[in-house]
Image: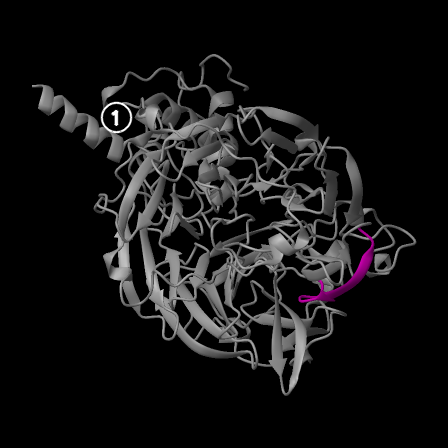
Amino acid sequence: MKRTLQLLSIILCNCLPALCPAQQPAAIKPAPAFTAQQLLALPTGDWPTNGGNLYNQRYSPLTAINRDNVGQLKGVWRTHLNGSGLETKYSGEAQPLVHDGVIYISTGADDVFALSVETGAILWDYRANLDPNLTTVCCGWTNRGVALGDGKVFIGQLDAKLVALDQRTGKPVWITQTERWQEGYTITSAPLYYDGMVITGFAGAEYGIRGQVQAYDADDGSLLWTFYTIPGPGEPGHETWSQENEVWNNGGATVWQTPAVDPELGLVYFSTANPGPDYNGSVRPGDNLYSSSIVAIDAKTGQYRWHYQQVHHDIWDYDSSNPVILFDVKIGRKLRKAIVEVGKTGWAYILDRTNGKPLLGIKERRVPQELRQATAATQPYPIGDPIVPHSVDIPPLGFELINEGRIFTPFYGPQGVIVNPSLYGGANWPPSSYDPVKQVLYVCASDIPGKYIGGDRDFEIPPDGVNYTGGATGFADLPRMGIFAAVDMTTNKLVWRNRWRDHCYSGSVTTAGGVLFVGRNDGRLLALNTDNGMPLWEFQTGAGLNAPASVFEYKGEQYVVALSAGNVLINSAHGDSVWLFGLKGAIDQAAPADTPLAGLDLPALQRVGAADLAQGERIFQQTCQPCHGADGQGGHGGGAPLNKGADLATLRRAVTSGKNAMPAFGNALTGQQIMDVSSYVLESLTNFPLPPGEGQGEGNKK
């Protein structure tokens, strides 16, 4: 019996290391106030910043794991994060940081965990306790990681708080309310620690905010400078907005990702989102600077230095959400300081980072016009290969193609127009990686034609915190496919390109061992050959792997660490696991979708009372709105419009069991919650009345 208990203890400590606190190290060693050179170096023993280094290259020079032995990788440990981020509204997109034997990871709930590299034990955790009634989240409740420096862990939250945690204990050192989430401001990106500052962008264009990047003092959280991505009156670029209204003050151009820094030039670089309202260009004639642009500002003051606009007067949601990458490249016989960003357009925009001028050439070409949308006469076309298709060869059922569905095809009014790419891109937020030796960029992208509706000259600016898209977007009834590609940065030509059967929605990390790691929606972590994209290894993690992995060395062994937590926009299985992989690992693959959502009974086994429409509205905003939009006409996830006739029973069945591309929520929502949200959709979005007696629950707004 004693031996049995000992064996059970060993098994539990290997599979559930959080249950074994005795294995925790005695103390966490605080990170230093990193110098620029420390953060500029290629990461080896640690992964100290979101992009691996200040250049955002996501490249590891380690070679112990390579093409010859990557097939031997197994799990060293798997740690569940105590259910954080498991609900359907959350997405797990964070890249782990590593310092001196400790891993730091955030979840979609903005909770932060410190894990022991040796055992996987949870050393401490910080709970954000976000307001459950937070209603200004665009695209699922998510967080893309933390920053580290000077003994603190920094996280930006969906409630627009910037928080510094004591690296040793996880206790807050300071909390700064940067902006009000009620006005639409949220933080989804990982902040950047640099030169004693914490630099962060803001999301919220879909709710009519004016984009900005801010720097805070890492010691006390005080504001140091602010750069507005929409220039105000009297500032260069303001003339590219309408002078007859105040739309510029709600013009979007938000920043979805962690900036990059060139310490020698003293510049901070980032790219911006589309202008707002998203699909209604009629009220914002002009190029709408600095939206859909790459921007450089002074690191010490936040003052403007240069910009390059990738899409003029964007009406397609072609924002530049992929993180910028800095690199030095030999073009001809000259070594040039370069920056690249891959847009939703599916092109790589390669610029001289000293001045923002194209390095390989970008041509302005005339594009089709729609005067009612005030479309730009020309658009930039980079010289080189597009990563994704820019047209639709055969019309989808029920649609007539205009201009062969080509990129930049305009639209106006309620009739949907098919355009390729869609708002998914091209490349979206999942970070690209760059090999500085091969001078090759690796890009996760998608081939998904979009359907666009919008344009209204009588559009009025809504109150703070109200949806501000000015139209709707969805997708044609066509397969959603992923593309993973390698692009030569000396020529902007494809090295290789592979098509995936599903949407590519995970960032990558590449190594000097000739191996690239990237996640899949079905839960697999893949290792690809960097020379040709051929698969070398795969491992099922149990939930959608929609976050980039990190690579590091600890006590002479190379490891790969990744968050497996799923994604609401992609409908991948949810989980709460961090996996550590190594050549000496002994844990085999998990089963797909192996993490149950705790505490929920099957709807068929539950007694259901009258509908609570107020609760139904909250569930819709947090779970359904990312795909179906605030008004049910379509959102960023491409959900079907909800304004068609339906009855309550049909809606409840669709929510419970799924329909077409919509996943089943029967194991994610209770029967009462399904009744509440179905009733809300029927009553408020389809304009069909509830059956008598169905909508009399407590909290009913009607």
Identity, as a three-letter code, of the amino acid under mark 1: Leu
Is 127 covered by the magenta stretch? no
Q: Residues within 10 Å of mark 1 (few under 14, many from 20)?
A: few
**Residue 66, above or below 268:** below
Which residue occupies 65% across, 71% down? 338
Query: Is 306 within the magenta?
Result: yes
- Tell me the quarter of the image containing the C terminus: top right
Foreground: 157 or 21? Answer: 21
In terms of depth relative to the viewer, which is nearer, 374 or 106?
106
Give above or below for 432 relative to 678: below
Percent from the top left, x then y, of residue 43? 51, 55
* Residue 366 showing in the rendered view: no
Q: Name the spot of residue 428 as percent of width and height, x first.
A: 52, 57
| 241 displayed left or right of 103 | right
- Range of magenta residues: 302-313
* Residue 393 horizontal/vertical position (percent): 43, 76
Q: Do we see residue 82 in this rendering?
A: yes
- The residue closer to the viewer here, 378 or 61, is 61
Picture quadrant of residue 647: top left
Residue at left offset 84%, top offset 49%: 245
Above or below 321: residue 91: above
